Image: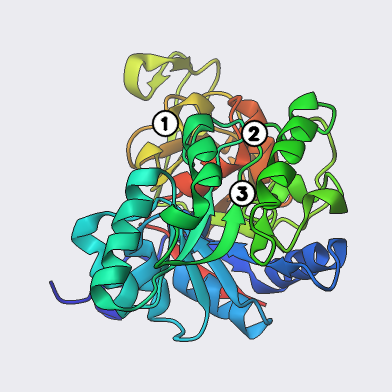
Amino acid sequence: MPAISNEIRNADQDTFLDINIGSLIKNYKKIKNKVSKTCAVAATVKANAYGLGIIPVAKILIANKCKIFFVATLTEGLELRQVNKKITIYVLNGLSVQNINLFYKHNLIPTINNLNQLKKAETSSLDKGKSLKIALHFDTGMSRLGLDKKETQILLRKKESLIKNTEVILVMSHLACADNPKNLKNEKQLNQFKTISRHFPNVKLSLSNSAGILLGKKYHFDLVRPGISLYGGNCTLRKKNIYNHIVSLKVKIIQTRNINKGETIGYGATYKAKRKMLIATIPVGYADGINRLFSNRIDLYFRNQKVKIIGKISMDLITVDLTKFIKSRLTGNDYIELVNLKNNIDYLAKIIKTIPYEILTSLGKRYQRRYIS
């Protein structure tokens, strides 16, 4: 399928998702300042760099001396490899025998999550006469990916016979409760990881994600792998966000109309006008990541003033109350801000009882992403 041309991509000039390059760089440098000089700061750019664009975000970070990246899938790894031939790329979801040749060909590093994957990697390395570089992921408390307790015991007991042909360049685990510094599970996982790491004296170690970084240097080891903190989201519970928000979203008004008292708005007629009103319609909706739970619940911004979403959010459309501007002149080129410093991703997440990760990664493909200084 041919690539979408810029002419087609920019046919709709109604929505703009702006990513502040300067704030992204500040966040990266702030993280670097929190770790020692011997600790590398990688970047987690899975899920299209949390919805912000894996290729442009990676280019920005590479220009600022980021050399190590984490993605979730092989497809993401292949896409990222097109950006730069020299960066180190880890694929968190592991490998399958059907695609193992692509790891060799494109110099991608699979994260080995179980003994079956390790066996495949070992067999492949032997067949090719070339060691596949791998990361070993040990589950210390997430019960998700990674070698479980039984597999860990087997591997540590039979390490010399199980790891002969591959080259282990990273040993890692993942913290389950790092967003809560008081949770005792953090220390428990740390101690388990230290015990495991003693079996790999000459291998790089990684435990901390964004929240783990804030637990202190004893959690940092040789490499940290921030994600949401790079993109401006809060990674802790009940603590002020120390990172810079980097995204804003504005949408052009495509239609306005006056309605009278008693008229209803949207699906289900969930909003009934109590007076004469001016209603604006903007061309985004839940298909663009604006959750239906925001219906009738949040303020947006028009000309730096709060305005309310009224009625249910549709797949592609949202109705907004502009009654306070009923006597103002609308230009036909007016925009409403959905995300800004006040309506930041942390605030929006709180309104619908979710997390900023979900707000960011839900942002749809129909926005025009602009990377601004």
Q: Tell me the kind of residue under disc 3.
A: Val
The x, y position of residue 282, in whole percent, is 43, 46
Q: What residue would you read off at disc 1?
A: 313
Closer to the camera in the image, 330 or 95: 95
Q: Considering only vertical position in the picture, is 45 above or below 65?
A: above
Q: What residue would you read off at disc 3?
A: 339
Any part of residue 255 in sight: yes
Mark 2 or mark 1, which is nearer the start of the sequence? Answer: 2
Q: Marks 3 and 1, how far apart in space?
A: 16 Å
Q: Considering only vertical position in the picture, is 246 above or below 337?
A: below
Which residue is rendered at x = 58% and y = 26% of the image?
Answer: 352
User: From the viewer's perspective, is the residue at label 1 or at label 2 nearer?
Assistant: 2
Label 1, secondary structure: give it: loop
Mark 1 or mark 3, which is nearer the start of the sequence? Answer: 1
253 relative position to 328: left or right: left
Q: What residue would you read off at disc 2?
A: 176
In the picture, the disc for residue 249 is none
